[in-house]
Image (cartoon, rainbow, N blue to C red):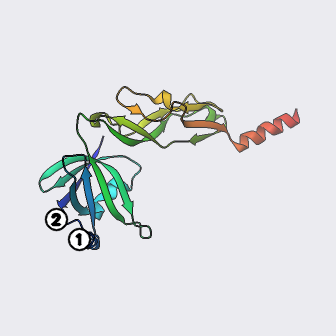
Amino acid sequence: MKSITIKGSKRESVGKKATKALRNADMVPCVIYGGDQPLHFAAEAKAFKNLVYTPNVYTASIEVDGNTIPAILQDIQFHPVSDNILHVDFYQLFEDKEVTMNIPVRLIGKSKGVMVGGALRHNIRKLKVRALPANLPDFIEADITELEIGNKLYVTELKSDKYTILHPDNTVVAQVRMSRNAQKAAQEETEEA
């Protein structure tokens, strides 16, 4: 999985006044959980652009006072009006500890059902996956080539040895339905016959 580097500095005080001063200086207060002690630090708001505002998923390499800590984005809080980032929580990664992440689903292939007039519905765009950090994929490929009108692609068809998908087996990832134009054409043919 690709990683983005975020450079920060350790926070000395974590009270309301210090946090407000950080935000006024265009910095974002952050915390890394999962280690021996939570690590409080601050980073520039623009450093999160490629991590937050993207459909892709990345791990983060956080550099604080010369130390590099691998982590994943756990939680993020936005201002209700301005949509600025208020606070970010990270979870520290360990090579031998499994982690849960939402991984995007990428549809590949051309569906047979769509080629004859069906409409493709991409029901789930991200799947919750549990894996070791080294086995986390950038995306999950879902082949829709064999889907005909009325067929569905279930989560069970996307299983892998490297990760576990944490959705029920009957979860539909994509399906091909009859489009309105195809329904009209079918009704007109029936009326003519």
Q: Residue 153 or 9: which is nearer the viewer?
A: 9
Other-residue count near label 1 (Cα within 10 Å), few / some / many at <14 / 14–19 / ≥20: some
**Residue hosting label 1:** 18
In which quadrant of the rendered image does the N terminus lie? Answer: top left
* Residue at screen point 28% across, 37% down: 133
* Residue at screen point 33% across, 55% down: 50
59 to the left or right of 186: left
Q: Position of residue 63 (x, y in %)?
A: 18, 53
143 to the left or right of 149: left
Q: CA distance from mark 1 to mark 2?
A: 9 Å
Q: Position of residue 176 (x, y in %)?
A: 62, 36
Do the residues under discs 1 and 2 have CB atoms within 8 angstroms?
yes
In terms of secondary structure, where does tag 2 sit?
Answer: loop
Q: Amino acid at mark 1?
A: Ala
- The quarter of the displayed image where residue 52 is located: bottom left
In which quadrant of the rendered image does the C terminus lie? Answer: top right
Q: Amino acid at mark 2?
A: Glu
* Residue at screen point 34% across, 64% down: 86
Q: Position of residue 41 (x, y in %)?
A: 21, 59
Residue 27: assigned label: none
Sequence order check, earlier mark of 1 and 2: 2
* Residue at screen point 55% across, 37% down: 174
- The quarter of the displayed image where residue 15 is located: bottom left
**Residue hosting label 2:** 12
Question: Is residue 21 placed above or below 47 in the rendered structure?
Answer: below
Q: Residue furthest left?
A: 66
Question: Is residue 174 placed above or below 29 in the rendered structure?
Answer: above
Q: Residue 53 or 82: which is nearer the viewer?
A: 82
Other-residue count near label 2 (Cα within 10 Å), few / some / many at <14 / 14–19 / ≥20: few
Q: Residue 179 or 163: which is nearer the viewer?
A: 163
